[in-house]
Image (cartoon, helix red, strand yellow):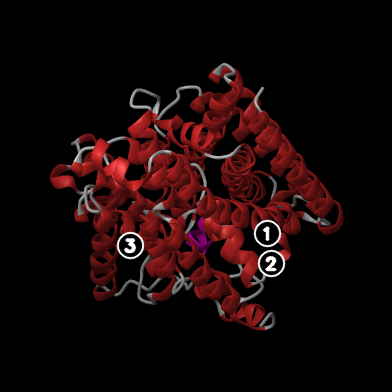
Amino acid sequence: MTSTFYVIIAYMAVMVGIGLWVAKRKIRESEDFLLAGRQLGPFMMAGTLAAAEIGGGSTLGVASKAYGEWGFSAGWYVVSAGIGIFLVSFVAPYLRKSMATTVPEILARRYGRASHIITTFLSITALFFATAAQVIATSSIIHVVTGMDLTMVIIIAGCVITAYTLMGGLVSVAFTDIVHILVITVGMAIAMPIILHNAGGWSHLVNTLPAHQMSLDNVGWKTIFGLILMYFMTFSTGQEAVQRYFAARNAKVAKTGSFMCSCLMALYGFIPAVIGLVALAHFPNIDPNSALPMAAQNFAPTLIAGVVLASVVAATMSSASGNMLAVSTLFTKDVFQRYMRPSATDKDLMAWSKGAILFVGACSIGIALGNYSIISLLILAFTMRAAGPFAAFVFGLIYKPATAHAGLFSIILGSIAAVAWQQAGEPWGIMAIIFGAAVSTVSFFVISKIEIALGVEPAPLAITEEHERAAAAEE
């Protein structure tokens, strides 16, 4: 084992210790476990939201895309995420005022049981793939650093992440997220110029790599615009992100924390892309998922490489934990308590929450063993959960004359359209999630207009006066 590996182990031991310490003092009931007691302040909110999104896709995924066909322009993947979260900031107050626990819960209030069941299924299924992507990212780093068999590493990493999540739920994750996000952003900002310098500098990259690999717009402006829309849609409907907004102390904190997170992600964006280019210039025949750890291990001092790789491992674990908690919340609130045992006690909810975490952990390990592209898995997850429900969820929060049928059929039609578009090979370079969401939005407003004209009553609002009063009491 290398010195870098022992730095990673030491870092992770400290994080697990923090998680256990916080869990012991902060968790008293299921709302603490799932929503941190709805007491996240702006800095905690920004940190845990950024840590949930700066995971495998925004680190190893960006470096692997820079190593591959996107080149330097892979940095837009994270910058676009920052812009997407900036746009979600304007929806954030409505999310917090809803006093909800899950995304399907809001859709159930507005459109009824059928919309609730479909959205719950889409959200849970998508999160299995998103969790698997983070397990792959975590395992890729440990595999490169230790040389251990990748299959064995995936199994071990998946088990450790599952155990880490079981320890303390969202309240522990939120505390450790602050450390993760500071270390990964500051550590990567320090490490990147060192790695670049030790690898021969920017001029070496320019002289070694094809010109298109160094282009800022190699990925294409259509794709960049598509990524911004994709992130706006997926962050405004994805349980692991929206759960953070639900957990904010109040609506103002939800908006402020979201703004802060967007700025942090935009500043961070191109750092892993540069490291991916360094790997391409010096190691042209490696697995793209190994680009970042390979460059860090070979061109950064041991301590810096260890801290950076440890923080990336921690960030991917944090993202995976957020996804597992999201599945746990969706299952306990939208399946178990709603349909299986409405009279469930808080003790029942805690037990089933932890059972759901164990189940999603096992399934994600199985998916991760396929060793798929990290970003491909994430985009699949984003498309599944956002393309159909986007219009019904986001516009349903603010558009009063929406009907129940408009919500239901926009979810169904948008989801079918996204799948069909994906199978057709995404004609004209339009992403499946964009096409599906466009169909969802058009059908939502057209059906609402037609039904209202025919005298159909609008669906009841998802945010009632009672919810508004409860949220106002927390201001």
Residue matched to label 3: 406
Q: Locate residue 71, reporting x and y percent.
A: 29, 42
Quadrant of res 301: top right
Say the numbered circle drawn on residue 35.
1
| Type of secondary structure dominating the magenta stretch | helix
What quarter of the picture does the C terminus occupy? bottom right
Horizontal arrangement in the rendering, residue 345 relative to residue 104 (left or right): right
Q: Amino acid at mark 3?
A: Ala
Picture coordinates of residue 20, whole percent (x, y):
81, 47
Q: Which residue is at a point 42% across and 40% down the rendered structure image?
A: 61
Q: Is residue 25 above or below residue 355?
A: below
Residue beneath the point at 54% across and 58% down: 50
Q: Is residue 35 visible from the viewing direction of this image?
A: yes
- Check if residue 104 falls in the magenta segment: yes
- Label 3 to label 1: alpha-carbon separation: 30 Å
Q: Secondary structure at mark 2?
A: helix
